[in-house]
Amino acid sequence: MASRVRVAVLGAGAIAQDHLRALRFSSRAEIVGIADVNFSLAQKAAAEFGGTAFADYHDMLDRLKPSAVVVCTPPKFHRQHVEDCARAGSDVLCEKPLALTVPECDFMISAVKKAGRQLMAGQVLRYYAGPKTLIEIARSGRIGTVVTCWSTRVGYYDPAHGPSWRYDPKIGGGTAIEWEVHEIDLLRMLAGEAKTVSARVLYTRADSPEFDDHVHAVMTMGEGAIGRIDASNSSYYSECTRGVVGTTGAAWCAWGDVSLRTAGTNDVQIVKPVLPEVPGDVNVGMFQQDDAFLEAIQADKPVPIPGEEGRADVAVAAAILLAGKTGETVRI
C-alpha cells in the first residue's frame, strides 16, 4: 500500500473535529499538524488526534510541509487559506462553501492550478447514506427520467449554541451560501446543472438584518427538470427531507434509509445503504469523503469533487440571493 499522506488541518472547531476523527481512522492519513488562531483549541485537538499544534498556519506550512491540508476555517477566509496552502505545495480539501462569491472561487481555482496542486470541494452530503443512494437511484434509470427533485431543510439556528460567525453573512455567507450549498449540490447531482432560478428570500432576524434566514427557490435543471429548495434557519418547525421524482418512480429520504416506489405498484420499498464499518464517533460520510481525497493523492489521479464543482454550487446560491432581491428569474 502507498505511504500515508501527511495531512494538516487548518482550523480546530467542530467541523475540523469531524475531519480529524475521520482522518485518525483512515489508513491513508498521518495527521502531522493542526493550526488555529485559538491556540489552546489547536493544542487540545493535537493532544487527542496527534500532530503538532500551531497558532499560525504559515508556521505549520513552513515547518511541516504537509502533502495535504484540510481547510476548516470560516468561509470568509477560504480563499486566502487555500491559496497559501497550495503555494506551499499542498493539495487542499476545502470545506463548503468553497468561497463567498464566484469571483473568489475563480481566483482560488486559478491559484491552485498555477501552483500545480489539486483542490477538492468539501461536499460531504454526496457521501451520506441517504443522499448518496438517492443519486445512485436517479442515475441508474430505476425511476425513469428525472422530472423534479427537492430539498426541505428547516429548523431554528440559535447563535448562542453554535459558532457566531455562521450568523454573520459577511463571514459565513448566510443560509443560501453557507448552509444550502449542500442541498444545491445534491440537486445538481440528481438532475443536472441549474440553468435558471426564481426565489423568495426573507430577512426576518432583527439582530442580524442581513442574514437570509428563509430561502425558497425553484430552478430549471438539466434538460428541463424542476429543482426546489425550501430552507429556513428561523423555523420553530423542523424538517429535513430530500427526494426525486422520475417518469416511472420516486425516491425520498432524510439521512439514512431511502424510500422507493416504482410504477406498477403501491408498495414502498425501503433501500438500506451499505456503509463501511467505522467507530461510533466517526462520521461515516466524512470518512468516505476524506478517504476519497487521500486516495486520489496517493494514486496521483484527479480528486472526485474538483474546485469547479464547489464553484458551481456557489454560483447557484448567489443566483438565488439575486433572484430573491430583484424578484426576477436569474439565468445562471
Image: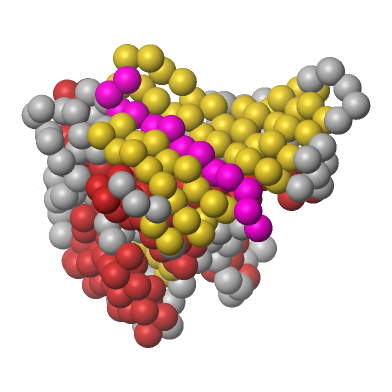
Q: Residue furthest front?
A: 328
Residue at screen point 36% across, 22% down:
155
User: Which residue is at the front of the view, 89 or 315?
Assistant: 315
Is the N terminus in the top left, top right, bottom left or bottom right quadrant? Answer: bottom right
Q: How many marks?
A: 0
Q: Residue 246 in the image: x percent, y percent?
A: 74, 40
**Residue at 80% from the left image edge and 23% from the top image edge:** 269
Region of the chain picked out in magenta, as a range: 223-235
Residue toward you, 210 or 128: 210
Splitting the image into 4 quarters, where does residue 59 fall? bottom left
Q: Quadrant of residue 15?
A: top left
The reply to whether the magenta stretch includes residue 38 is no
Using residue 266 as the reference point, say whether residue 2 is left or right of it: left
Q: Is residue 233 magenta?
A: yes
How far across and how far down the image is residue 135, in percent? 67, 45
Q: Residue furthest left?
A: 207
Instruction: Looking at the picture, tell me which residue is in the foreground, 147 or 155.
Output: 147
Left or right: residue 9 compared with residue 251: left
Residue 36 in the image: above or below residue 165: below
Picture coordinates of residue 79, whole percent (x, y)? 26, 65
Residue at the image point whose x is 24% and y is 29% from the top: 162
Is the magenta region chiefly helix, strand or loop?
strand
Q: Residue at the spot x=38%, y=43% of the render?
A: 199
